[in-house]
Amino acid sequence: MDVKAKKRSVVPFGPQHPVLPEPIHLDLVLEDEKVVDVIPSIGFIHRGLEELVNRRDFNQYVYIAERTCGICSFGHGLGYVEAVEKLMNVEVPVRAKYLRTIWGEMGRIHSHLLWAGLMADAFGFENLFYQCWRLREKNLDLVEMTTGGRLIYSVNKVGGVLKDITPDMQKVILNNLSEIEVELKDIYKTFTTDYSVLERTRGVGVLTKEQVHDLGACGPYARASGVERDIRQLGYEAYGDLDFEPVVSTDGDNFARCDVRLREVFQSIDLIRQAIAKMPAETDLSVPVKGNPDGEALVRIEQPRGEAVYYVEGNGTKFLNRFRLRTPTFANIPAMCETMKGCNYADIPLLVVTIDPCISCTER
Amino acid sequence: MGAKFTPKQTLRVIEKEGLLREVMVMKSRHMRLSQACASYKDGHYELSYSFADDETMDYETLRVNVGLAERVPSIHNFYSCASYYENEMRELFGVKIELIEPDYRNKFYRIKAETPFLPEDAKAEQKKEEAEISLNGADSDLDQEQAARDEKQAEKDAAAKKAADEKKAAAAAEKAAKKGAQ
C-alpha cells in the first residue's frame, strides 16, 4: 500500500489580518487544512509602560496606566490605584467605590459589545456587526456624559475619584440602559439561534474545564467552559454589596463564549442599576493621601477579558520601583493556541477573536 | 451582603533549590498558575510565581531570589502555560531559565528595544558572572547547544553576506565594463 506522509506547511497569520484589531503573529503548522501546531509571537506594540513607573510620580502614573489600552482603560486605572491604595492603607469613600463600580461595568458593556461586533464581522455577518456597534455607541454616550471621555475616562485618582454622577445623570443612565437592554435581547437571540451563526460557532474550538485549569485561562473564556470563577466575587469596590453570580456556560466552544459574554452585558446592566439604587448620598469623592508608597502590594480585578493582576512595589519616594501588570489576554494565549490544534485553518480567525484579544494590554 | 470570599494573600521567599518541590505541592493542591514575573533588584533577580485557589480565592506567591547569571529550572512540567511567562522573563529580563518547553528562542517578543531590561552596570555584571561560570566549566547543555546554533547561524550569515557582496561586485564590474564599451 502506498502510504504518503502528510505534507506539513507553515502559514503565517498576522500581525496584519482583517480580523485582528491589533497585531499578534501566529505561525500555523498545517497538515493539509488541519492545524497541528501554533507558534505565537507578540511585542509589535510594546511600549515599555511598566518601566515608565520609575520616571513618573505615582499620582501621574494613573493616567499612564489607563492608557495601557483603549478598550479596558478604566480597569487598568482602577487596578493600579487599588494597588497603590492597598500599599498606602487608604480607604476611599463609599460613594467613590460605587462610582468606580458603575464606570467599571460601563467599560465591560462597551468592551463586550465591541467584541460582539468584531465576532459578527469575523464570521461575515456585517449587519449584526453594525447593530452591536450602534448599541455600543449608546453606552459610550453615557460614559462621555459622566466622565467627559469616551474611551479614556481619567476619573480615578489615588484616594478616590475626580467626578460624580449626579441624580439627573443617573436618570439618563437608567433610561439608556433600558433601551440597550431591549435591543440587546434581539442581538442575543441572533447570536444564539441564527442558523448561519451557529454553523460557525457550535462545537468549534472546544476547551474543557480541566484544560482551562492547566492552561491558566481566565475570564469569560474560562467561564464558557464551566469554571465558576469571577474575581468580582472578592468584593472589591462596591461588588461586595451587589447581588450577582458568575455567568457560566458548559459547552466550552465558540457558541458558549458568545453566550457568556452577551449574558454578562445583561448582568452589567443589572449591576449598574443595583449600584445606582444603593449608592450613598455622600459629598466626599476622595480622601487626601499623604506620604509616598513603600512596600509591595498585589491586587486582582476582573477586567472585561478576565482576571488582571496588578503588582506595585514602592521605595518610600514618589517614584515606584516596579509595576507589573499581568493581563487576561496573556493568560488566555496558551489556551487559545491549544484550542487551535486540530481545527480547520478557516476557523482560526474566529478562534483568535473568541479570546477577545487585547494586544495593547498584553504587550504594555 | 458583603464579599462572598475572604481570601488570604501570602508571599513566601524560598530557595531556588526548593522551587520545583514547592511548585509540585501547588499543583497537587490544585492551584492555578496565575502569573510569573521577574524584576531586577539590588544586583539580583526577584522571581515571583503566583498561584490561585479558585475554590477559596486564596492567592499564594513564591518568591525566589537568584543571581544575574544563575540558572533557574523551568516549571513547565507542572504547568504547561508557565513556558509563556518563562520565555517572557528570559527575553525581556535576561533570566537564565533552563529547558523551557516550548522554547521560542528570543522570538516570543518581537521588539526593537534592546533587551534585557537591566541597568548598564547590571548588564556588565551579568556578563562577568557568565564568563566566570563558563570558565568553571559549568555551562549547561542548553548553553552549549545554543552556542553551537549561534555559531552555525553566524557562519551561514557570513556566507550569505559574502555571496551577496560578490554578486554586487560582479554587477558593478559588468556595469563599468558596459559603460567603458559605450
Image: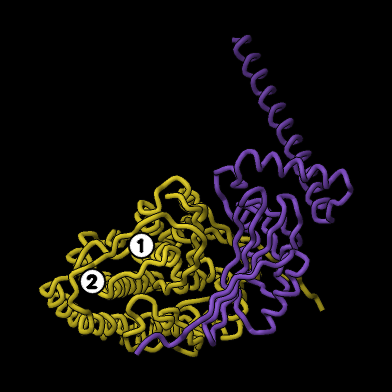
Chain colours: A yellow, B purple
Nearest the eye: A88 or B148: A88
Q: CA distance from mark 2 to mark 1?
A: 15 Å
Q: Is residue A34 left or right of residue A89?
A: right
Give the chain letter at badge 2.
Answer: A
Q: Position of residue A302 (x, y in %)?
A: 42, 74
Q: Is residue A236 left or right of residue B63?
A: left
Q: In this orientation, which residue lies closer to the viewer: A296 or A278?
A: A296
- Residue depth check, mark 2 versus mark 1: number of the one nearer the observer: 1
Reading the chain from its start, which is encountered first: label 2 or label 1?
1
Please rate how many residues cluster around mark 1, counting C-alpha atoms within 10 Å: few if below 14, some from 14 to 19, many from 20: many
A92, A102: nearer the viewer = A92
Identity of the residue drawn at 45% across and 45% down: A55
Q: Are marks 2 and 1 on the same chain?
A: yes
Rendered image: mark on residue A197: none
Residue plotted at (70% across, 74% down): B23
Q: Is residue A200 visible?
A: no
Check the picture and name the quadrant holding the C terminus of chain B: top right
| Residue A31 image position (x, y, % from top left) | 66, 70
Lateral position of residue B78 relative to residue B49, left or right = right
Q: Nearer the viewer, residue A59 or A333?
A: A59
Q: Is residue B116 above or below residue B166?
A: below
The kind of residue on which mark 2 rests is Asn
- Residue B70 appears in the figure: yes
Count of picture labels: 2
Q: Residue lying furthest left in this view? A: A168
In this view, B43 is above or below B48: above
* Element class at badge 2: helix
- For residue A298, above or below residue A197: above
The chain carrying label 1 is A
Using the image, tell me which numbered label, if any, was put on residue A139.
2
The disc at residue A73 is 1
